[in-house]
Amino acid sequence: MGCSNCLQLATVFSLALCSLVWADHEMKFTITISPGEELPNKTIYVIKHKNVTFSCSTTFQQKQNISWIFVHPDSNQEVFTNVEGAHTEFTLFDIGYDNQGNYTCSKNLSDTKEVLVYYPPKGLPVCHASISEDNVQLFCSWTEGYPYPTLVWSNENQELGPDGLSGSNDTTVLEIKGSNLRDGQLFKCVGYHIAYEQRMERSCSLTLKAPLPESQPLVTGYVGKNTTLTCHSKEGNPPPKLTWWRNDEVEILPNSKYIISEEGVVSSLTILMPSKEEDEGRYICKSENPLGIKEVEIWVSFNTKVISGLVGGITIFVLLSAATIFGVLLYKNWNKLITRRHFWQTGSTVFTLVDSEEENDFVEEGSSGITSVINHQTAQTMNGHASVEVASDDPQTPTKDQLPNKERNVSDV
């Protein structure tokens, strides 16, 4: 129906009829993106790694081609579906950040939805403190998420940080003036992110502490040899500043005499080519942060190399002398310690084989040269062999002479 006809009808039935006629020919789209949530600006966000279904329907009854077209901000458009009918849909599995962009359901007319892919930061928020003049700055960071998280500082259940549902950065800084600082204060940073389905809380905390330095109380060096003193802060948050002082009067600064190096909460002072007169004495390591100043004393002494060499030479001489005397004594008593034979007596009978020429008195002619000594009695030799008579020391064992006559006669036969 043309516009002129609409005007003619308007004179009779009023303008309301014209609106109804045009509405009958108008194409409308119904777009559903699930699971997804709509923001106040009509943008829809989905959560990374979810399976997301895109559905588009039209009220126009005639058959026609309906397309889903995706346009990434940094690329050309891409057609996902193109069907003939009044409804079309598709699903993106494990949706990622690259799928973020504008999705358009189109025929001659079109309806576009901007889709954002959200994902939470990794891990937990990280808290740390630093010094800013006489104040303390508290940093809370929660990175690698989209969009930025909301980070809120609190102290003793009192919120100190920003309010709102979304943050403007992945790090928030809270500055505390020196007058409000005290040792042992506990601060907590809570992070919120829209990508957490249950809005789970993630947090970190820190405690402010006064410094407490530690070092060796006594250090001994050598004249003319570089000597290093080390000091570290056992406690202290924010991390304290470490400085070196001589006799609590003059701060030691790096120069041709001193080298100062720092690594974390550890500071080292190296004294170059020290002398006993100038460099021996009291040194101080000071540890300072806005919560206090603590110091530790180090007493340094230096020995000359001549004395140390002389002591070492005397020690070596004494050791060598002791070794020489021990060697001489061992050599002189070698035969007694090594070649001397020891015989052990078990029970009442001892058998000893002697091949010494001094024992030839016990050997008769025609014997094999081996004499058996049994309780200081010699063995009789028969036909070149030694016969052994064993005499027991046991007084209860009768000898041959003590046997009865009958028993002796039988044995004699």
Image: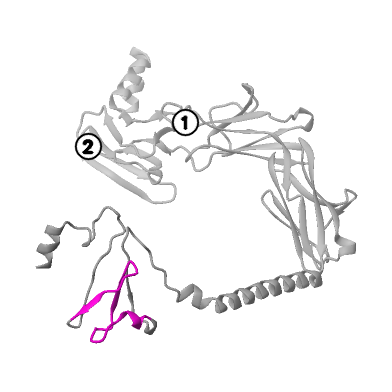
Along the viewing direction, whichever of 118 and 68 lies nearer the viewer: 118
| Frontmost residue, 326 versus 31 | 326
Instruction: Between label 2 and label 1, give the one nearer the viewer.
Output: 1
Residue 257 percent location from the top left of the image = 83, 65
Give residue 333's quadrant in the image: bottom right
Mark 1 lies on a secondary structure that is loop
Asked if the stretch drawn in magenta spans residue 367, the answer is yes
**Which disc is residue 64 wearing?**
2
For the magenta stretch, what is the residue range?
359-382
Cα separation between marks 2 and 1: 39 Å
Amino acid at the residue labelled 2: Gln
How crowded pointer 1 is (Cα within 10 Å; few <14, some 14-19, many 20+) is rated as many
As for residue 282 lying within the magenta part, the answer is no
Q: Specify the farthest residue to the top.
A: 13
In the displayed structure, 337 sits above or below 126; it is: below
Color scheme of the displayed model: one colour
Other-residue count near label 2 (Cα within 10 Å), few / some / many at <14 / 14–19 / ≥20: some
Query: What x and y, as percent, mark residue 168?
Result: 58, 36
Where does residue 176 sit, x and y in percent of width and height?
73, 32
Question: Is label 2 in a helix, a strand or a loop?
Answer: loop
Determine which residue is flagged by label 1.
Answer: 194
Q: Is residue 60 above or below residue 252?
A: above
Quarter holding the N terminus is top left
Viewed as shown, does residue 365 lie left or right of 299? Answer: left
